[in-house]
Image (cartoon, helix red, strand yellow):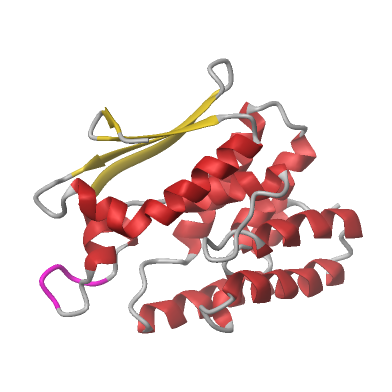
Amino acid sequence: MVTYEDIRRNPDVRALIEAGNHALDMAGYTDHGYAHVGVTAKAAGDILEALDYDARTCELARIAGYMHDIGNAINRSNHAMSGALLAFDLLRGLGMEIGEITAIITAIGNHDEHTAAAVTPITAALILADKGDVRRSRVRAKPGTQRFDIHDRVNYAVEKSTLTVDKTAKRICLSIRIDTSHCAVMDYFEIFLTRMTLCRSAAEFLGLNFELNINETRML
């Protein structure tokens, strides 16, 4: 059985993560390296765990979270689909059972907001985990430089973000604290409205309501 730790330590997976993160750095994107995939993997598994999914399904969600951005090594455009194809070959080579591979590549292939759809629990958890990773430490450009664009400004303004599941209340909540001296709350919506709409559909697939709280005020 291929485990999350097997994937996390796999040199081929790590090489693809590093290559994709480097390419996005050169193109001016925020961090998509080990920190991002690690946060995404943990959150995806934690979401399903909080909803009482079995341990193996939670582990597959973590594997999908860790591998979800490997397609960036090829190109940012269509990276979800190319990443799914790369993951298929890698996991097949490791001897993973085809049903588990399918669960992972379906999630990877459906995580990008331009083509995403919450079609399985693992997919829904990955969407929520990926889009919920908003934080200052993802920003690589320096404030005040030409490269520091609105995406950087919005992420830089986020002092703290948490994603919590309340199974009893059937709710998943993304709570964000923003320093409004760096960006207005409306700037966040300008950049992330499509992502938040996707999070709402992913939450609904899991039987949850999605809430977005910014500076202790409910926005969605």
What is the x, y in percent for residue 42?
Answer: 56, 45
Against 4, is 77 above or below?
Answer: below
Q: Look at 61% across and 44% down and name the residue there.
A: 125
What is the x, y in percent for residue 164?
Answer: 47, 31
Q: Quadrant of the C terminus?
A: top left
Q: Nearer the viewer, residue 84 or 25?
A: 84
- Indicate left or right for 2 with 61 as reference: right
Residue 142 lies within the magenta run? yes
What is the x, y in percent for residue 15?
Answer: 60, 77
Read off the magenta span.
141-145
Identify the image quadrant of residue 82: bottom right
Residue 45 lies within the magenta run? no
User: Quick check: can you spot residue 161?
Assistant: yes
Q: Look at 63% across and 63% down and name the residue there.
A: 67
Identify the image quadrant of residue 47: top right
- Indicate left or right for 101 with 47 as reference: right
What is the x, y in percent for residue 138?
Answer: 34, 60
Secondary structure that dominates the magenta span: loop
